[in-house]
Amino acid sequence: MSAVDETIVREYFEAHGFLVCQRRKYIVQARQKTGDEEVDLVVLNPRGSAGLPAGFEITSADLATISRAIVAVKGWHTEVFAPGVLAHQPKIFRFVEKRAVEEAQRMVGGEGLLKILVVPGLPREARTREKSIEMLRAKGVDGVISFRAILQELIARVRTNRNYQNSDLLQILRLLKNYELLKEPQMELKLKAKGRR
């Protein structure tokens, strides 16, 4: 996982009042990662209600219900997490293994500990999307957050008249907005094409 991906996810959780701990400061190269090394972030929400998000796909509004979670960031920005990808990539689920969960529980407590996967996206087609969600749930994942939702939220929060000197990511987003290289989201209208008579 790239440091950029982790920084984006960290900023997102911090923007919502979470305390964020990076699990490891080293990169594993000579051997396969253990389950606890697959956990990228452990997050704690001091104001969280220890509930469950409304749906499997977690939104910014759902974050208030989360008190603590382990987060794995899979920034494969060229792939959608369809059933084929999930079936052939067992390492995606290493962060939900017993050793990883126990380590996170030692850090932040065990009650209400969710296992969240940050993904580029799920399939658009409803049946394939549901199958992906079933597979993720069966492996022990409690919810997913898409990079698209995270980036949209961060872009919307950044103000051009503020100086984000302590965050390289937010400062870059501010500059892009300031020079009108990033636009506010616009409503998309779906119009049916009329056939010729």
Image (cartoon, rainbow, N blue to C red):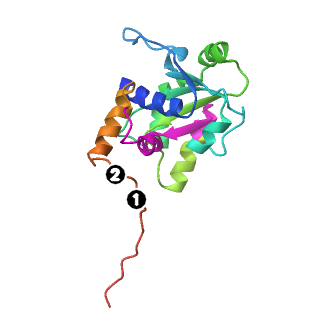
Q: Residues within 10 Å of mark 1 (few under 14, many from 20)?
A: few
Give residue 186's mark.
1
Report crowding for label 2: few under 14, some 14 to 19, many 20 or more residues within 10 A (C-alpha).
Answer: few
Give the farthest residue toward the front.
161
Looking at the image, is 112 positioned above or below residue 131?
Answer: above
51 horizontally vs 165: left or right:
right
Residue, x 48% and y 55% (percent of image)? 125
Q: Is residue 189 magenta?
A: no
The kind of residue on which mark 1 rests is Gln
Q: Nearer the viewer, residue 31 or 161?
A: 161
Does residue 20 appear anywhere in the picture?
Answer: yes
Left or right, residue 89 beside residue 107: left
- Visible in this render: residue 59? no
Q: Position of residue 82 (x, y in %)?
A: 47, 43
Q: In the image, is residue 136 part of the stretch drawn in magenta?
A: yes
Amino acid type at image mark 2: Lys
Give the magenta-colored segment's residue range.
135-163
The residue depicted at 39 percent of the width and 24 percent of the height is 166
